[in-house]
Amino acid sequence: MAGSNVQVRLAHSPVLRYCLAVASIGTALGLALVSHRFNFHNVEVPLFLFAVAISAWYAGSGPAAVAVALAILLFDYFFTEPRYTFYVTAGDLPYFAVFAGFALLVAWFSAVRRRVERELRQASNRLEAEVAERTRQAGLLDQLNQELKRRSGELEAANKELESFAYSVSHDLRAPLRHMAGYSELLQKRASSSLDEKSNRYISMILDSAKRMGNLIDDLLTFSRIGRAETQKTLISLTQIVKEALSEVRQETEGRNILWKISALPDFYADRSMLRLVLVNLLSNAIKFTRMRPQAQIEIGCTDGNGENLIVYVRDNGVGFDMKYANKLFGVFQRLHQSEAFEGTGIGLATVQRIIHRHGGRVWAEGAVDEGAAFYFSVPNPQGQPWTQTTN
Amino acid sequence: MDTNNKLGRILMVEDDPKDVELTLTALEEYNLANEVVVTRDGEEALNYLYHRGEFKTRPDGDPAVILLDLKLPKVDGLEVLKQLKSDGKLRMIPVVVLTSSKEEKDMVASYKLGVNAYVVKPVDFHEFVNAIKELGVFWAIINEPPPGSLRK
């Protein structure tokens, strides 16, 4: 057989392929006749088989069949007794049958070989196409990666800018504020005795405003820092966090009569300092808005939610709010009460919302005017397990 | 306690004249203002400490404490701190950063450089006066400064 590396190509036109079969048989006949002339005998069979093989190889199975038929006819006519007739003696029939069988076998082998080769070539073509597609996709991916890198660079730059903005707010706004407060106070000290009541009131208003602006700046900075800081989640005990938050707001409860109801609270994964800030804000609000109650009641509890979330709530019996403003509660600088009634910057609940969102949870509130309020936040409970209770 | 006998000198590095005046007012209430040297930027502070430039002829002796603002013209506070704490002799002088910045990175950077205390200037005047007073009393009176410090 031909070397396996030889690329065999079928002639495209069928006419050419049949011509090739006829020509190769013709050549074989010619060579056989010439050999006979020089008294070389018994070369005709291998020559014809060779021609059949070539036809099968280069021209396909149809031309190969024609070649086999031609070879048998020509062999009968030129090389079997009686020569130059198509007459076949009964004794020669097995010989012809074997010849035909052998020729068909050669043709069949060649055809199989061709088919295998063709399939291999197709497979290799498919592979090539796939490699090309993969390369294209890799290029695309690379392009996307570049784009992503660029975007993340831009984001980083924007973040840096924000950071330096927050820094300058922290540093540069605080200084003039301190001067306003400081010098007003010095003025008050030196001149209060010689000033009339109205002037003294003006000075204390300046002082109040400076102090309020100081608180605003601090709260805004906390709010912006939460947007920038990375959350570091560890397993925290909510009971412990509530305890810490309570001691932080202790000062605000002085002289107050507050009944605390704290149920068993779960442990879960969250950023410890951020969650403490959430509770400090919620508790401080509850303390503030129950101020006019002779007996304030603040309840902290937890429900299991739908199994995927833990829901923590802080409920009070304070002034409450109108549910139609519920969507305004968590906005920055949104306040539902006049500042004379309840002090505050209007950033606390926005901070709470930002922290909880960063934990993949949500916040909401229920309440009614003069009937208290309840603030809820949910945090995902990835294990989906019932939470572990810690006794209070 | 007769504090006047052992007052330490305070070197204040502060570019804002209003802050300088406020601080001096606060220190005055406790008779601590007389021994305050005010420098207005990092370079001037270093000149003072190294007896250079306009401080070439100043009397010997290091301050008992340096009150250092961070945001300063020319050489900023962290740079001053870095130079002081890498100087074999000057590194012993206690340095208190007194700044408006509550930013954690400033705090971390200062402590990494070996600052002795970090105080955020309170906006509220009473708290400010208290903070300055306590700083003055602690560092200029209670604390034993390193040998070589100037005492009255």
Image (tube, rainbow, N blue to C red):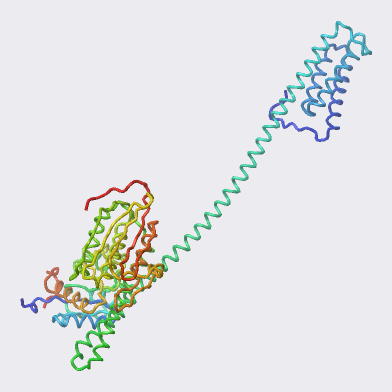
Q: Is residue B90 visible?
A: no
Residue B95 place in picture, x, y as percent: 22, 70
Residue A332 left/right relative to A108: left
Q: To which quarter of the image does residue B37 belong?
A: bottom left
The residue closer to the viewer here, B69 or B119, is B119
How many dots with numbers?
0
Q: In this picture, is A165 found above or below A80?
A: below
Question: For the view shown, which residue lies furthest in the left direction?
Answer: B1
Q: Residue A74: x percent and y percent?
A: 89, 17
Give the residue at x 83% y 14%.
A43
Percent across and percent down for residue A139 are 58, 50
Left or right of residue B83: residue B59: left
Most distant residue in the top direction: A91
Q: Which is nearer the eye, A181 or B45? A: A181
| Residue A308, position as x, y percentages in the image | 38, 50
Q: Is residue A181 visible?
A: yes
